[in-house]
Image (cartoon, rainbow, N blue to C red):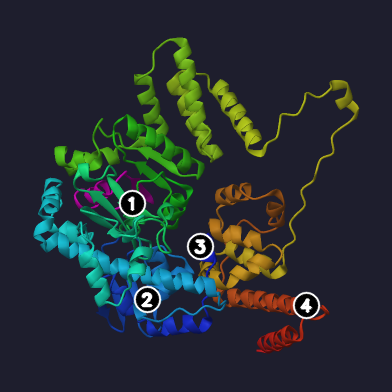
Amino acid sequence: MYTPLDGKQATMGKITEECIRKVKEATDIVELINKYVQLKRAGTAWKGCCPFHAEKTPSFSVNTSRQSFKCFGCGVGGDAIKFIMMYENLDYPEAIRKLADISSIPIVEEQDNPQERRRQKLRGKIIEINNLAADYYHRLLCRSPQAAHVREYLKQREIGIDIAKAWQLGWAPVSSDGLQHLAAQKNIAEPLLKEAYLLGTSQSGRTYTIFRDRLMFPIRNMRGETVGFSGRIMQVDQDPRKYVNTAETAAFHKSDLLFGLYQARTHIPKNADTAILCEGQIDVIACHEKAGLRHTVAPLGTAFTEEHVHLLRKCGTRRIILCLDGDAAGIKASEKDFRILAAAGMEVYQAALPPGEDPDSLIRRDGADALRTLVEQARPFLEVRLAYEQENTPTDSNARAALAHRMIDLLLCISDPIARDVATADMASRLHIGLEELRTAVSSGAKKAERMKTGRRPAPAADPEETAYRQAPVEIARPLTVHRSIMALCELALCNDRAQELIIDRIEELMEPMRTLPGGSILQSILEASPPPGDEEAWAAFLGTLPAGHALALRDIPVRHIELSRPEHHIQEACAAIARVTLEMQRDAIRARLQDPSVPPDEKLELSRQIVEINRMLIE
């Protein structure tokens, strides 16, 4: 499913077609896929088990001559870029950058923004420094006599050398001399170590190390880049902060990162699009390595955010199992996470850990099977929360009424109206309240919340006599104007599975037309939601998410799956038409600019050159 670029990505310029061509030419698809899937030669092709669905008999084929892959079991296929997008859960530009990194090809962007170029250069240097530091810290943990107490701590947590290597755990010493000496050997200046938040400067001007005697967890983004660190204190009396994370840098944004997501990203789709959410790094590692629950992640000591939901959605997540500490604080944290997740349309479940236990401690006390069982038996969050509340609420009528209001408040967090109504019916049964009464209370609460959100006040009661002869004017929704080329792509995306997939593959070149052409926002909505062609229920649900004008613009598109003999040809024609229209609009805008007498001569010369270039492109 296509995911729109976030704000930071959107500031990057568009990667040039020449750069994309070089990346494709430098990538051998067999060599690439063989890093992820064990392939065996079968005639002129290579075969293996598909990484995108469970199978025992290989149906996944890679064609060297065409530089493409195809699974004859689940139907997925494409080129090297498509494989990386699907396997790594990256969007198109991120996949290009990932392949460029593998082939050591520098990324070239069309819009040369000096400020952005400097930021990207600094970001690259910070990641290089982080890789160097991660390797240094890891070697110290494994070999240094001074790290014996850290190794003993890990031993007590039943984390052996193999797990430490898999997660590149490390130890940061008290002194910064070793890291500074290593950086100097690599011609890395001290100011860059400070930009990476590995060194700091005191008020007196003294340089010191940020991470002192800490167990180090490298933090990786979705591309596997080491963007920062989280360090756990080894001596409590040395620093009151149990964990210290890298501060905001050009590469590290704590609210945009989840620990373990890089490792979990390919396992979430294999576990019914489910992710497990824990509280800490040790818990995540224990779930992955001891219990085999490799779809587990955790925030970096910060509150769960909408940005975190966005990351999980990129991995195809639709269901979350909260696996937080089973104490009062854990239950309170669960509610905060539920409110954000439910508002984003996620299904939220709760694994009922015993009070005082976290995933790691439960595994060490009762074994991995105990945790796996609790995860398998996870129940809807509201059901678990209500049971907890009922155990801790007096039985008098006032207390029960207060409990009902608390649960209504949580029901209002569920954004999906169908899911909310199902949960309301279940809640009414468990609270022994009339269903219609509870539905009325929830509906009233939803309307009140909407008024508070928009700042509207309830309309005054109408005068019945006045209403009899005077009606307020009703604004009639009108269909949004949609350019014919945009509408052609909308119809293709909604009527044929393969066509929808091909359009999403070309999303990078469609970003500008969707922004400028009439109705482009409708096409973007379709690509974001990707409603299955021919599915009437999915179609109705999708239309319900659109503004009235957008929905009316699509009213004439048939709700059925249409077979296309050459979908690639149809997509190419539509995209070519859109590209032509976009170029013509750019040319018209430039011509209008040329008519402005205030435009200086040198700018007019450049504008004239641009018109010539656009005319050349239109002729080609």
x and y percentages locating residue 263 in the rendered image: 30, 59
| Residue ID at (38%, 32%) | 332
Disc with the residue nearer the chain's start (2 vs 3): 3
Which residue is label 3 attached to? Answer: 8
Query: Magenta segment range?
Result: 273-299
* Labelled disc at residue 271: 1
Residue 364 vertical position relative to residue 24 in the rendered view, above or below: above
Q: Amino acid at mark 2?
A: Asp
* Labelled disc at residue 446: none
| SS class, disc 3 | helix
For the C terminus, give its image quadrant: bottom right
Q: Amino acid at mark 3?
A: Lys
Disc with the residue nearer the chain's start (4 vs 3): 3
Quarter-of-image position of residue 609:
bottom right
| SS class, disc 1 | helix
Residue 579 vertical position relative to residue 221 in the rendered view, above or below: below
Q: Determine the CA span between mark 3 and mark 1.
A: 30 Å
Q: Determine the CA span between mark 1 and mark 4.
A: 55 Å
The answer to whether any part of residue 251 appears in the image is yes
Which residue is label 2 attached to? Answer: 101
* Labelled disc at residue 593: 4
x and y percentages locating residue 113 in the rendered image: 55, 74
| SS class, disc 4 | helix
Q: Are marks 1 and 2 in contact (CB under 8 Å)?
A: no
Q: Determine the CA span between mark 4 and mark 3.
A: 30 Å
Q: Nearer the viewer, mark 1 or mark 2?
A: 2
Q: Determine the CA span between mark 1 and mark 2.
A: 29 Å
| Residue 130 located left or right of residue 66 | left
Disc with the residue nearer the chain's start (1 vs 4): 1
Q: Amino acid at mark 4?
A: Arg
Quarter-of-image position of residue 162:
bottom left
